[in-house]
Amino acid sequence: MRYAAVAASALLLAGCNGGTVDRHALTNDAATIDSLACEGALLAHDASKGASTTTFVRVHSDALRAQASHLADALAERPTSPGLERRVRRASKDAKAVADVLSRLHHHAGDREVAARAERALDRAGQCP
Amino acid sequence: VSKVFGLALGILAAIGGFVDIGDLVFNVAAGATFGYQLLWVVVVGVVGIVVYSEMCGRVAAVSGKAVFDAVRERVGFRAGLVTLVASEVVNLMTLAAEVGGIAICLQLLSGLPYRWLIVLAILGLAVVVWIVAFEWIERVFGYGGLCLLVFAVAAVKLGPDWGKVGNGFVPHLAQNDKLLYAYFAIGLLGAAMTPYEVYFYSSGGVEERWTPKDIGLNRANAIIGYGLGGFLSFALMITGGALFLGQGIEPEHLGTIALGAEVPLGQIGLLLALVGILFAVGGAAIDTVFAGAYNLAQFCGWEWGR
């Protein structure tokens, strides 16, 4: 019983940390970073045109920022499969860059110029269509 | 006139019951992942819930018994108790999700801290359930939830490929990502056929004192009410497919769903979407509370009612 509890805890902790980043996980995480960037770009676009509300831009950009930031932290710390470390750490930096832009949008939600700059930066980061 | 008001029961069940937090998130996510390919699953789900609800409503009209009255009577105490416990656990989990949805929606509207809004949402629900007359709950949440129709306008304005939308209604299997496709198909069926909708619907029939003469009203309620819910599900999935699929966006936040109305319709689209989500999720939370209490009271033979 005790061993089962220890094994379950270990599995849980490994799950919380996300485990080792392999090629498949890296592809998924990179897609998530692009997704966050492109969604942020859509939000910033509407903010720059005055087509959103300041509150919505502030709250939603913060939710996206938090997710990008967690991803950046996880990708910076998690062990990686052999040969992938450099790409994983670069993905972490990409996620951090996206989180930084979303943070600016969050703090200047009513500023259309900041929003326009954020849109361009996020578009580039996510290579949005 | 009374029949028209009677139909409001179906509309509340549709908006507050059919379109809840699970439907909102799952339909948009399915659209963003597979485009319009899973529209046929929503049709299957709607037919399922219409058949099940109509059947339970008919039992209520003919026998005057709601679901858990009949369960206890037909399958006995032990098997009935297992069903009751399972139902209440599912109800509680659903309620937690709906309360979280209300708090997020209020946060997107007000900018206030999320944790405080959870407390406010719980208190608000308690006050509404305890104080407000059921007729008003029915009207306010039922018709407030109709703001979700903004997603139908958004879906049209986004200019989807209508040929592909039409193809989505033809049942088919995915060419790739079969497991993910199956996951979404099962999830969409589960979201369309959540149990509390039927408990609430059937109990409502007993409370309205349906008789065999009301079987036609019951059928109209089930078909129109859940049909409207299904129509909104189509709109949500089409919005997800038309806006998010091409951009590679994976919707993981309630705000992303509102963004689906904001991008094509601007501020007014955003506000209608948030208000609609608030009322739909609030209505679903109230349905869940009532359904949980009714189930327990019916099973134990206690007095129950609004």
Image (cartoon, rainbow, N blue to C red):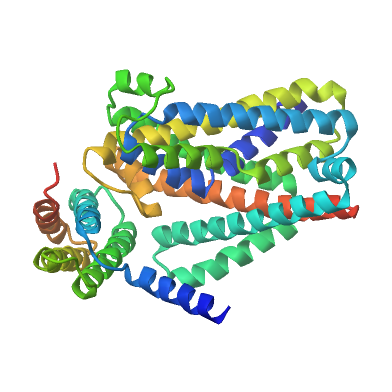
From this viewpoint, which residue is outermost toward the bottom? A2
- Where's residue A40, x and y in %? 22, 55
Q: How many marks?
A: 0
Query: Left or right: where does residue B198 sit relative to residue A121?
Result: right
Of A64 and B267, the residue lying toward us: A64
Q: What residue is shown at x 88% (from left), y 35% (from top)?
A: B64
Query: Left or right: where does residue A54 sit relative to residue B282?
Result: left
Q: Is residue B78 visible?
A: yes
Q: Is residue B47 above or below residue A50?
A: above
Q: Is residue B133 above or below residue A67?
A: above
- Where's residue B151, x and y in %? 40, 36
Quadrant placement of the N terminus of chain B: top right
Q: What residue is shown at x 61% (from left), y 53% (from top)?
A: B285
Q: Is residue B132 visible?
A: no
- Where's residue B259, x and y in %? 32, 47
Query: Left or right: where does residue A89 sit relative to residue B49?
Result: left
Of A89 and B103, the residue lying toward us: A89
Q: What residue is shown at x 68% (from left), y 23% (from top)?
A: B220
Q: What residue is shown at x 36% (from left), y 32% (from top)?
A: B238
Of A15 and B282, the residue lying toward us: A15
Q: Is residue A7 above or below residue B40?
A: below
- Where's residue B227, x and y in %? 57, 27
Query: Left or right: where does residue A2 sit relative to residue B52?
Result: left
Residue B130 placement: quadrant: bottom right
